[in-house]
């Protein structure tokens, strides 16, 4: 039985104790810690912990412990609770927050401004993923019931439950944006709420009437960023007595008017261009687009550039009901599964590596690819490249059908691999989308396996013999 409290306690103990941990945060699958002394981390014991799927960044101040979806939320909360309790008891200063581990810390390696900006934007959208998943699944169930003509009294209620969050997602984005960038969250939400207010239909900007929801999450992000800047400007110039009254008033007034008479129109144009561009890309260059997206996604993840796709996914879901990009990108993880299976077959005498593969494969099949990437394919070198070839082949398969008019989309972001099946839909409903996606996965598995078996090992490497590698546990970032 899973014991998240024990896991959190063990992770803290093996990372040098609470006093060695300076920052705590998490993404969808990883607990991210900034440690004061990287040498105090017992990487081997950390990897051996039950429930730990992988360790990334050992030997650096930015440590990532791969735990998987769902588990990472509860373990992170428990780590933060234990750190807070230790700080109260011993006076040790600990910090926890939404900013990714290492950013803004003098102890952590400096990242470029682009990487920092993308990470901070991602921090706005990652907390929305559980609601997107839940509402996406309910929307899919409601659609199936409607198409089958079952439970007609229940389907309107399911539609209301599934659609309520999406109708107000701009408010949540505004709230989280202000929180992430140092403003008052409720003011960010208040300004972003202007976007979804029905009364905006009476407002004319650039000669046309605005539409409720125009600009969507991109407009909400821009509105809340502007509100945060205005709020900070006011707080630095107004005395305390006036600050209480004037700062929120000026913030909401100026940012709200700017949103109505500029940001909604501009963000709406950008959102429309994103939707049009994604559809054009797949219907015109389907297989080629799939090859590129499926083959290069994991290198983008390692560089941190995949964060730029999160608001694009959210915009497509808000605009079209699903994102056509995620099923293509999910093929990258499937290629890694095929490549790992080839390594398992080829290196039959490397019992340690085969044990790693056996333990990591279930997570890989469900779309959690870090254990296979950082524990198997990337340290070996060539298998990572050949696995990416498998991802490209799977992406090309899905993209080919998109060009034929059979688009596959996901109603939520977050899950991948087999876990994405309940969220799949398309222009012709979920059944064709599921069949095409399954074909893409099988293609990625098969090509990743065959390419790795044929080209994933240096010439002269005997079967069952592990090719030499300098480091089995490279530091990486996703």
Image (spheres, rainbow, N blue to C red):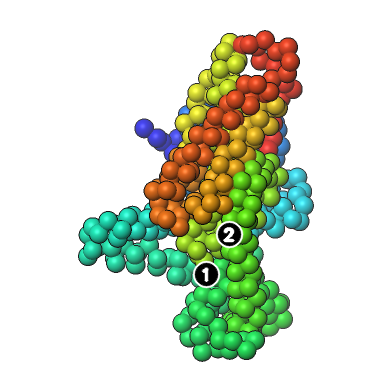
Q: Are marks 2 and 1 in contact (CB under 8 Å)?
A: no
Image coordinates for residue 299, horizontal then vertical, percent:
68, 41
Q: Quadrant of the N terminus?
A: top left
In this rendering, the answer to whether 434 lies above or below 194 is: above
In this rendering, the answer to whether 240 lies above or below 163 is: below
Judging by the rendered image, the residue that carries numbered circle 2 is 279
- Residue plotted at (53% across, 48% down): 401
Element type at mark 1? helix
Image coordinates for residue 352, horizontal then vertical, percent:
57, 17
Q: Residues within 10 Å of mark 1 (few under 14, many from 20)?
A: many
Comes first in the chain, label 2 or label 1: 1
- Residue plotted at (69% across, 20% down): 457
Q: Residue furthest front?
A: 404
In which image quadrant can residue 166 be found?
bottom left
Q: Quadrant of the C terminus?
A: top right
In which image quadrant can residue 74 be found?
top left
In this rendering, the answer to whether 88 lies above or below 349 is: below
Image coordinates for residue 303, horizontal then vertical, percent:
71, 45
Element type at mark 2? helix
Q: Label for residue 170?
A: 1
Q: Label for residue 192?
A: none
Q: Nearer the viewer, mark 2 or mark 1?
A: 2
- Residue plotted at (45% across, 70% down): 167
- Residue plotted at (65% across, 86% down): 206
Q: Residues within 10 Å of mark 2 (few under 14, many from 20)?
A: some
Q: Is residue 304 visible?
A: yes
Q: CA distance from mark 2 to mark 1?
A: 23 Å
Q: Is residue 76 visible?
A: no
């Amino acid at each position: 039985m899973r014991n998240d409290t024990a896991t959190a306690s063990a992770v803290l103990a093996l990372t040098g104790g609470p006093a060695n941990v300076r920052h705590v945060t998490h993404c969808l699958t990883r607990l991210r810690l900034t440690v004061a002394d990287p040498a105090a981390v017992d990487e081997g014991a950390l990897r051996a912990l039950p429930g730990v799927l992988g360790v990334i960044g050992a030997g650096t101040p930015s440590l990532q412990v791969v735990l998987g979806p769902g588990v990472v939320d509860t373990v992170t909360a428990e780590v933060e609770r234990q750190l807070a309790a230790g700080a109260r008891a011993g006076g040790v200063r600990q910090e926890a927050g939404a900013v990714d581990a290492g950013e803004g810390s003098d102890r952590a390696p400096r990242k470029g401004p682009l990487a920092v900006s993308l990470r901070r934007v991602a921090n706005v959208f990652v907390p929305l993923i559980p609601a997107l998943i839940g509402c996406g699944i309910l929307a899919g169930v409601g659609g199936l019931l409607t198409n089958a003509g079952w439970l007609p009294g229940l389907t309107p209620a399911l539609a209301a439950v599934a659609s309520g969050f999406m109708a107000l997602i701009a408010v949540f984005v505004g709230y989280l944006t202000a929180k992430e960038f140092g403003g008052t969250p409720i003011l960010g939400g208040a300004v972003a709420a202007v976007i979804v207010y029905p009364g905006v239909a009476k407002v004319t900007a650039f000669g046309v009437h605005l539409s409720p929801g125009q600009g969507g999450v991109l407009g909400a992000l821009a509105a809340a960023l502007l509100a945060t800047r205005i709020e900070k400007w006011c707080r630095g110039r107004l005395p305390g007595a006036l600050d209480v009254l004037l700062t929120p008033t000026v913030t909401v007034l100026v940012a709200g008017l700017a949103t109505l008479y500029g940001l909604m129109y501009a963000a709406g144009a950008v959102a429309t261009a994103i939707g049009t561009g994604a559809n054009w890309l797949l219907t015109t260059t389907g297989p080629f687009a799939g090859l590129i997206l499926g083959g290069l996604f994991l290198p983008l993840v390692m560089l941190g550039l995949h964060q730029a796709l999160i608001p694009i996914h959210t915009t497509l879901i808000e605009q079209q009901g699903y994102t056509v990009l995620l099923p293509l990108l999910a093929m990258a993880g499937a290629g890694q599964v095929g490549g790992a299976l080839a390594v398992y077959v080829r290196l039959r005498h490397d019992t340690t590596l085969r044990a790693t593969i056996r333990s990591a494969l279930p997570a890989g099949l469900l779309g959690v690819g870090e254990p296979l990437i950082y524990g198997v394919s990337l340290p070996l070198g060539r298998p990572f490249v050949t696995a990416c070839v498998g991802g490209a082949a799977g992406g090309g398969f899905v993209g080919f059908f998109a060009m034929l008019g059979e688009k596959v989309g996901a109603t939520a972001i977050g899950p991948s691999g087999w876990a994405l099946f309940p969220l799949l839909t398309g222009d012709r409903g979920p059944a064709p989308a599921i069949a095409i996606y399954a074909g893409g996965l099988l293609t990625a598995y098969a090509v990743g396996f065959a390419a790795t078996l044929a080209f994933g090992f240096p010439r002269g490497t005997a079967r069952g013999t592990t090719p030499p590698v300098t480091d089995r546990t490279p530091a990486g970032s996703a």
